[in-house]
Amino acid sequence: MRQVTLISNHNLQLQEVDPPEPAEGEVLVQTRFMALCGSDVHIWEGQQPNVRRPVVLGHECTGVVVRSTTGSPEPGTPVAIVPMFSCGHCVHCRAGQQHTCPQRQVMGFQRQGCLAEFLSVPAANLLPLAPGQDMALATIFEPLGVAIHAAGLAEPKGDEHAIIFGAGSIGLLVALFLREELGVRASLVDPNPARVDFARTLGLEAVGQPSDLDLGHLTSRPLAFDCVGRAESADAIFSLFPAPRMAVLVGTYDPGASVSLSRLKNCETRVVGSICYSVADLQRGLEIMASPKSDAYAQLVVEKRFELDRFEDAFRTARTTVGATKVIVQMTS
């Protein structure tokens, strides 16, 4: 089979290797589509030093079951792959919070990813697709799961206003989910004019700076989401007025990032971190992408698709495209 392996920064190689042999409890899946994530590009560029090379990238993937050691799902079943793994026995896992497991691993980061023609994964890490579901668009279930999880932590009410810092894929998905599923008004803040323009084409409110926000109409304190992952964006959230009643930290921060604790104390803003998702979040994302509501989220997908042997073009497109940021790699011809 073919797989694309990151050897070193900017050095991806198409390799011929033997297909994996599923162990007991595992399922052999032929991958069909994979969506490139911003984190894939960051790893490729060397901005994720904790990812060991060589590694096969990718964690947003759909495929078809080829062989199962468990009898389920049956061969021929279209599936989405849950890319997160946990130890299964720590306090977090036993509490149903596998996504916070200290030993959590994600495909394409701590273990081999989806940019390969075949994968062997535990049966528990497969979610069957709906009959006739578009397998390419279904890959959006994974980043949508991130957005669903973050939105759920905020406990939003329909009459609230949410302010989202960062109009990349996750920020846009948070805004769309809040609007489409929960009826919450959302405003995006991003200094990149092209991102602001694209968000507006989706019917979303977007501005370049926090000072451009129109919050004079608010009769209650807003929600806030940091989908950037920088101390500056978090600090901007805590400088808003009215001060947010809750701030959800979604982005990935440097270990030394900090904010003013006195400011948090004085405005009584509740702060909650958001990491990954639960399987229930992913299942909901998959159901949304199988419904007519998927049209709103599908606008984030770059129309042009790339076959596996054009992986370099796919990465370059993902790095340079602003707006529709999800680049789809078609794994089989």
Image: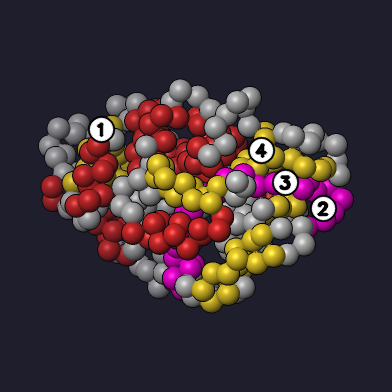
> Circle 2: is it few (<14), some (14-19), or many (20+) Cα within 10 Å?
some
Q: Residue at x 31, y 47 (%)?
A: 323
Q: Determine the CA span between mark 2 and mark 4.
A: 16 Å
Whether tag 4 and tag 3 are in contact, CB under 8 A, the answer is yes
Q: Earlier in the sequence, mark 2 or mark 3?
A: 2
Residue annotated with mark 4: 79
Q: Circle 4 sits in a helix, a strand or a loop, which is it?
A: strand
Which quadrant of the rendered structure holds the N terminus?
bottom right
Identified at 34% across, 26% down, the residue is 183
Highlighted range, magenta: 20-47
How is this picture coloured?
Answer: secondary structure
Left or right relative to 325: residue 185? left
Viewer can see residue 92: no
Indicate the secondary structure of the residue bearing disc 2: loop
State the residue position of label 2. Answer: 22
Looking at the image, is mark 2 or mark 1 nearer the viewer? 2
Is there a contact, CB below 8 Å, between mark 1 and mark 3?
no
Q: Are marks 4 and 1 in contact (CB under 8 Å)?
A: no
Q: Earlier in the sequence, mark 2 or mark 4?
A: 2
Name the amino acid type tagged 4.
Val
Query: Furthest-front residue in view?
Result: 333
Mark carried by residue 29 = 3
* Disc nearest the viewer among 4 and 1: 4
Mark closest to the chain's N terminus, 4 or 3: 3
Mark 1 and mark 3: Cα distance apart in space? 38 Å
Q: Which numbered dot is residue 203?
A: 1
